[in-house]
Amino acid sequence: MGCLEQVPSRCSGSRPLRPADVAARPYQSEVSAGDSPWRGLAGGRYGALKRAGKSTTLVLFVLLIVGSLLAAWKITGPALAWSNWHDDLGEGMEASQVTGKPVLVLYTADWSKPGHQFKREVLGAPQIVSYLRREYVCVKIDLTDRAGPNQEMASEFGVRAIPTIQIFDARGRPIGSRVGSVSVPEMLKLLETCRAVSG
C-alpha cells in the first residue's frame, strides 16, 4: 500500500486522496483562504527590505541636498562675504563720508597663510559679515605684489605684518587697529567699540 492510500484513514471522507487533489490545493494547511503563498514574503522580510530601501533613498537624497548647499556656501559664501569690499582706500573714504560709517581697512596678501585663515575664520564668520555690511565701509588692500603701489601706502600707514586691520572714522582719523588674527568675539568687540567711538 502506497503513501497516498494511507492518508484517507486520517481525513474525514471515504474516498482516498488522489494526486489531482493534492495539485489542486497546494499548501492549503499553511496558507489561509484568499492568501497567496508569496504574501508572507511581501509583508515580511521582503517588505521590510522594501521599506528600508525607501528610507535609505530618502536619507541619501537629504544628504545630497545638504552636501550641495554646503558646497555652494563653500564656493559662493566667501565670495558673497567680500562682494561689498572696496579695493581702493580713496573710494572707501568717499563712501564713508557719504554714509557716515567708519572705514575698516584690511591689509592682506595671497601668499599670507595667516591672512587667509583670518579672512576665512574671522571675517568670514556670519555675524562678522552681517555686522560689517550694516555698520562699516570695508576696504581690502592687496599686498601680494611686494613691489606694487600698495606697498608704499602700507608703509606710510605703518603696516609691518599681515593681516593688519586699521579703522578710521568718516573724517579719516584712526580710531582702532589690530595686527594678526583674533577670535570672532574679540573682533566683534573691537568693531562695536570703534563704531561707538566713530559716532
Image: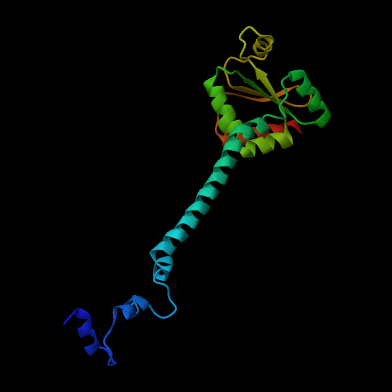
Which residue occupies the foreground of this view, 164 or 51? 51
Is 22 displayed left or right of 163 in the figure?
Answer: left
- Residue 77 in percent (x, y) is at 63, 35
Is 109 displayed left or right of 13 in the figure?
Answer: right
Is 181 displayed left or right of 154 in the figure?
Answer: left
Q: As displayed, is residue 31 above or below residue 173?
A: below
Quarter occupied by the C terminus: top right
Q: As displayed, is residue 163 above or below residue 61?
A: above
Q: Which residue is located at x 20 percent, y 79 percent? A: 3
Q: As displayed, is residue 66 above or below residue 90?
A: below
Q: Which residue is located at x 81 percent, y 31 percent? A: 99
Image quarter for residue 4? Answer: bottom left
Is 95 displayed left or right of 20 in the figure?
Answer: right
- The reply to whether residue 10 is visible in this rendering is no
Q: Residue furthest left?
A: 1
- Residue 73 in percent (x, y) is at 61, 37
- Residue 178 in percent (x, y) is at 60, 25
Q: Which residue is located at x 76 percent, y 31 percent? A: 101
- Residue 97 in percent (x, y) is at 82, 26
Q: Which residue is located at x 62 percent, y 11 percent? A: 145
Which residue occupies the foreground of this view, 93 or 48? 48
Image quarter for residue 33? Answer: bottom left
Which residue occupies the foreground of this view, 177 or 183? 183
